[in-house]
């Protein structure tokens, strides 16, 4: 129980001496302080599916600081359980050697080339934190999995292949754009000839995929997150209005066919 354990007896004595609370109430307070820092439904839902031989994709709208903070906290939580983890980011694979140099202290994070649509200060800070954690002994691998501009293979095919190779080495946690996390899209073939996204490709190949989309309310406010189960009608409405609506595709009938859950950022 960390810091609080050394103060239990003292706190109990003071509170009972002053007649402030009963023993029962004291127990409730102790239980409250004993809860894990990240004991929330969002963390619980994602953390419970990260496991060996699985790829867990956390989708995002790029350049959102909340997304990076959430992703960093998931990594911290998982590694604190004495586990190993492969962290995959939407950075071109040709930058892997530079990332490795950063880990060895031979290059700075600023030397890594990141697509402008993805790059922002919190994302760079995430990489810097992961490198520092690795240097301090964390059982962590940082993998760049995106296709470079020079690659002729489609981005989703490329990223799927990179993730498939990594998952044989340990559990994978990936931060990708929301659309890459979609497990199934009912394309309108009269309008498009689009190919499946990363999650759908990997599922078709027999891999165990967990995917979560992050969706933000439009309001400019102090946002908090909550998990929306894919089985809830609310999830289907959000997937269709926020993601499928961007595509030449038919609406999904069940969000659970497309995603495992939605992390909704809203005012509150």
Image: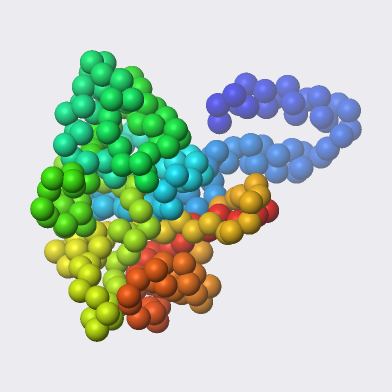
Point out the image quarter for the N terminus. top right
Q: Position of residue 151 (x, y in %)?
A: 12, 48
253 with respect to 101 (left or right) = right
| Residue at the image point whose x is 64% and y is 51% from the top | 220
Q: Is residue 125 above or below residue 55?
A: above
Q: Quadrant of residue 143?
A: top left
Foreground residue among 78 and 129: 129
The answer to whether residue 161 shows anywhere in this view is no
Residue lying at the far top in this picture: please name it.
Answer: 106
Image quadrant assignment for residue 111? top left
Residue 151 appears anywhere in the view: yes
Image coordinates for residue 223, horizontal then vertical, percent: 61, 50
Where is 249 relative to 86, above or below? below
- For image coordinates 59% across by 59% down, the residue present is 218
Q: Which of the pair 137/202 is nearer the observer?
A: 202
Q: Is residue 121 left or right of residue 182?
A: right
Which residue is at the far left?
A: 152
């Amino acid at each position: 129980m960390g810091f609080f354990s050394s103060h239990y007896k003292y706190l109990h004595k003071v509170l009972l001496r002053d007649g402030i609370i009963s023993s029962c109430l004291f127990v409730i307070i102790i239980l409250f302080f004993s809860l894990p820092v990240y004991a929330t439904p969002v963390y619980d839902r994602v953390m419970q599916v990260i496991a060996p031989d699985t790829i867990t994709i956390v989708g995002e709208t790029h350049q959102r600081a909340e997304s990076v903070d959430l992703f960093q906290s998931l990594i911290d939580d998982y590694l604190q359980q004495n586990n190993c983890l492969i962290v995959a980011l939407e950075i071109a694979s040709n930058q892997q050697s530079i990332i490795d140099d950063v880990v060895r202290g031979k290059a700075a994070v600023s030397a890594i080339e990141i697509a402008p649509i993805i790059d922002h200060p919190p994302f760079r800070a995430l990489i810097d934190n992961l490198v520092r954690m690795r240097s301090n002994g964390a059982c962590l691998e940082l993998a760049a999995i995106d296709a470079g501009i020079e690659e002729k293979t489609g981005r989703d095919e490329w990223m799927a292949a990179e993730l498939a190779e990594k998952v044989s080495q340990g559990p994978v946690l990936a931060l990708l754009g929301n659309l890459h996390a979609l497990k199934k899209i009912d394309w309108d073939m009269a309008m498009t000839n689009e190919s499946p996204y990363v999650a759908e490709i990997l599922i078709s190949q027999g891999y165990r995929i967990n995917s979560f989309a992050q969706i933000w309310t439009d309001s400019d406010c102090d946002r908090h997150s909550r998990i929306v189960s894919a089985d809830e009608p609310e999830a289907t409405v959000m997937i269709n209005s926020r993601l499928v609506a961007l595509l030449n595709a038919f609406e999904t009938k069940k969000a659970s066919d497309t995603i495992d859950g939605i992390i909704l950022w809203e005012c509150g």
